[in-house]
Each structure stands twice: as structure tokens, then as C-alpha cells.
Image (cartoon, rainbow, N blue to C red):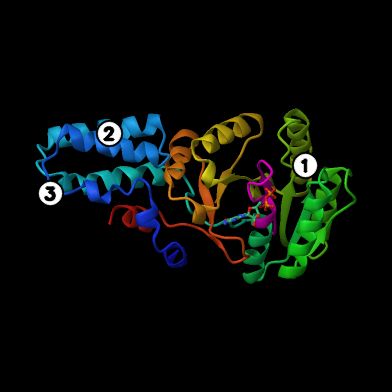
């Protein structure tokens, strides 16, 4: 997590809802609440959560007869921490109880699925795990090539078939490859075409069925890869996806490109699913789990 702040050193100045400055020694006023609301909305916290955070803060200020805005800061920080920590496994990197694990990466094209697959492969390999990358985006030849390139770069075995082949069959083969060594993790890069969403959901369901036959269901993770830059649209995307195909968590990519990290809070409060990793760049090492306390402290200091 330290790496996070090293890489995104100026995040506070870029953080559009750099709310820290609002908690000054000035008296708590209507203007303070209005400004805070503006900052939270600009930072992608979303209307619903912004309203609820403000309501709570207002009633705390009234109840405790708080005079200075700075005396509200700690309570506000705690509210944000609670929003995140209420979600089980928030910020925890993946680990599997059984010998075999499957990570299905789903999401729209361009969100960063292939890159995240490579980053996860590198990270599990570093921990000494056997990893196989499954090129289940059989729709785009370029996606298969891309994954192969990542496989070479990270020294990870890639299971792929020709474009247009059955994605579930690719996953089946990848599962056999890890099973043959006894333990390991299959990271599945899936298709993300939106215009044929229905077929995509069928395809994902089939992949999941194949995985469930081979692996304990508690060792199958379905992570939606979301581009943090898309902000509140990401929330809509997440809700739509989750309704069609149950997710177990998120990877928020391109966090290095946005100052609007409020999407993290929206996802936590609306979907109650953990953000497992954040993507902080295009290289294989640019993936971090994230620590709620440091995140909130960084935000408000
Ligand atoms: P896919 O279509 O979902 O598989 O997306 P890709 O993995 O091909 O990524 C799309 C683009 O986003 C590529 O140019 C990646 O290098 C870039 N990308 C992915 N993750 C990150 C990230 O965390 N930070 C930055 N800056 N770029 C990223």
C-alpha cells in the first residue's frame, strides 16, 4: 500500500474532492455543508451516499454542538471508513482455501481486463503459485495475441485456442493444466463486448458452470474490472453486470488517471462487494490491494 502513495504522490492535490481543506477552524455553517456536498459529488461519491454522509454529519454536529468544522473531521473520516469496512474482505488481496483457484475477470472492453489478468498472474507467481492464463475472450483475435504477449513477458503459461472457439472449452483446458500439477490458479480473461450482452452473459454462465464442476465454488472469484475514470457510469455498469451475472468483487483500474476515487465508496455502499485491487499503471507490477485506513487518512490529511 505504501507503493500506492509513492506512485500517486500528488493524489491529494489531484483528488477533486480534496475535502481536507474544508475542515478548517471556521465555524460549522450551511456553506461548509454545501461545499462538502459539491466536493463529494465532484469526486464521484454519488448522490445517494453523499446525502447520507451529509445527513449523518449534520446530525452529529447538532447533537454534539460542534463549533468548528475541524472538529467534524474525525467523525467524517470514521463515517467513510465505516462505509468501506462494512463490506467483508474490502481491500483484501485474493487467497484461496483450496488447492485450485479461479479468477474470472469480467467487464467491458478497454476496462483493463487483459492487463489485470497479467498483473494478477505476476502477483500469484511471485507468491510461488502455479498460474495459467486462460484466453477466454475468443471473440477478439487481438485479445488472444495480447494475452500471449503478457504470458511471455511474465513467464506465465497461456491456454488459448483460435478466435471464435468456445470460451468455456478454453477454461476447461486451463483448469486441466493446473489440475495436472495439483495446485494453482487459473486467471480467465473474458470477452467484454457490450452490444451482444445477452450472449456474453450466457457465455460467462457457461464458463462458471465449467469452473464449478472442477473447482470448489468458494474458490471461484468473479471480479468486475472497472475503469475508475468512468466514474458514476462505472456504478451503473457494476449494478447492471451484477444483476445479470453475480460478482464477488471488483478491480478498479486506471486509478493513476483519476482523482475521483469516490467510486470506491459508491461501490461499497451500493453493492456491498469488496474492491480487491486497484490498478495504478500499465506495467505488471502496477497492481495494489488497498488499505482502508491509509486511504481515508490520505484523503483527509
Ligand atoms: P481489456 O480490453 O479490458 O482487456 O483492456 P486492456 O487490458 O487491453 O487495457 C486497455 C488499456 O488500458 C491498455 O492500454 C492498458 O495498458 C490500459 N490500462 C489497464 N489498466 C491500467 C491501469 O491501471 N492504469 C493505466 N494507466 N492504464 C491501464
The reply, left or right, for residue 263 in relation to residue 109 is: left
State the residue position of label 3: 25
The answer to whether 159 is drawn above or below residue 199 in the figure is below
Question: Mark 1 and 3 residues: CB-CB less than 8 Å, in contact?
Answer: no
Q: In terms of image quadrants, where is residue 203?
A: top right
In the image, residue 61 lies in the stretch drawn in magenta: no
In the rendered structure, find residue 54 and report the number of the disc placed on it.
Answer: 2
Badge 3: residue crowd in 10 Å (few <14, some 14–19, many ≥20): few
Q: Earlier in the sequence, mark 3 or mark 2?
A: 3
The reply, left or right, for residue 45 in relation to residue 180 is: left
CB of residue at label 1: within 8 Å of ligand 1? no
Q: Earlier in the sequence, mark 1 or mark 3?
A: 3
Q: Position of residue 179 (x, y in %)?
A: 80, 59
The secondary element bearing badge 1 is classed as helix
The secondary element bearing badge 2 is classed as helix
Magenta region: 98-115
How far apart are labels 2 and 1 at the CA level?
A: 43 Å
Image quadrant containing the C terminus: bottom left
How far apart are labels 3 and 2 at the CA level?
A: 19 Å
How far apart are labels 1 and 3 at the CA level?
A: 56 Å
Residue located at (73% from left, 50% from top): 189
Q: Position of residue 300 (x, y in %)?
A: 29, 53
State the residue position of label 1: 207
Amino acid at each position: 500500500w505504501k507503493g500506492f502513495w509513492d506512485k500517486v504522490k500528488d493524489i491529494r492535490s489531484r483528488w477533486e474532492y480534496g475535502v481536507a481543506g474544508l475542515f478548517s477552524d471556521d465555524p460549522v455553517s450551511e456553506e461548509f455543508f454545501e461545499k462538502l456536498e459539491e466536493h463529494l459529488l465532484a469526486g464521484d461519491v454519488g448522490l445517494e451516499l453523499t446525502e447520507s454522509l451529509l445527513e449523518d454529519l449534520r446530525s452529529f454536529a447538532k447533537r454534539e454542538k460542534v463549533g468548528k468544522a475541524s472538529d467534524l473531521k474525525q467523525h467524517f473520516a470514521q463515517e467513510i471508513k465505516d462505509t468501506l469496512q462494512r463490506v467483508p474482505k474490502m481491500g483484501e488481496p485474493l487467497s484461496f482455501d483450496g488447492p485450485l483457484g479461479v479468477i474470472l475477470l469480467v467487464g467491458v472492453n478497454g476496462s483493463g481486463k487483459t492487463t489485470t489478468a497479467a498483473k494478477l498472474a505476476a502477483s500469484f507467481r511471485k507468491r510461488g503459485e502455479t498460474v495459467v492464463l486462460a484466453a477466454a475472450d475468443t471473440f477478439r483475435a487481438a485479445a488472444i495475441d495480447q494475452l500471449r504477449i503478457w504470458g511471455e513477458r511474465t513467464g506465465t503459461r497461456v491456454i488459448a485456442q483460435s478466435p471464435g472457439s468456445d470460451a468455456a472449452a478454453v477454461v476447461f483446458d486451463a483448469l486441466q493444466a493446473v489440475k495436472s500439477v495439483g495446485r494453482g490458479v487459473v486467471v480467465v480473461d473474458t470477452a467484454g463486448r457490450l452490444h451482444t450482452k445477452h450472449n456474453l452473459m450466457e457465455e460467462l454462465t457457461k464458463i462458471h458452470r465449467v469452473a464449478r464442476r472442477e473447482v470448489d465454488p468458494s474458490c471461484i472469484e468473479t471480479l468486475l474490472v472497472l475503469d475508475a475514470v468512468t466514474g458514476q457510469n462505472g456504478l451503473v455498469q457494476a449494478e447492471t453486470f451484477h444483476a445479470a451475472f453475480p460478482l464477488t468483487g471488483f478491480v478498479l483500474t486506471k486509478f493513476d488517471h483519476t482523482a475521483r476515487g469516490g467510486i470506491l465508496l459508491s461501490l461499497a455502499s451500493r453493492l456491498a462487494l469488496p474492491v480487491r485491487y486497484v490498478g495504478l499503471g500499465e506495467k505488471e507490477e502496477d497492481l495494489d490491494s488497498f488499505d482502508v485506513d491509509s486511504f481515508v487518512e490520505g484523503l483527509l490529511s
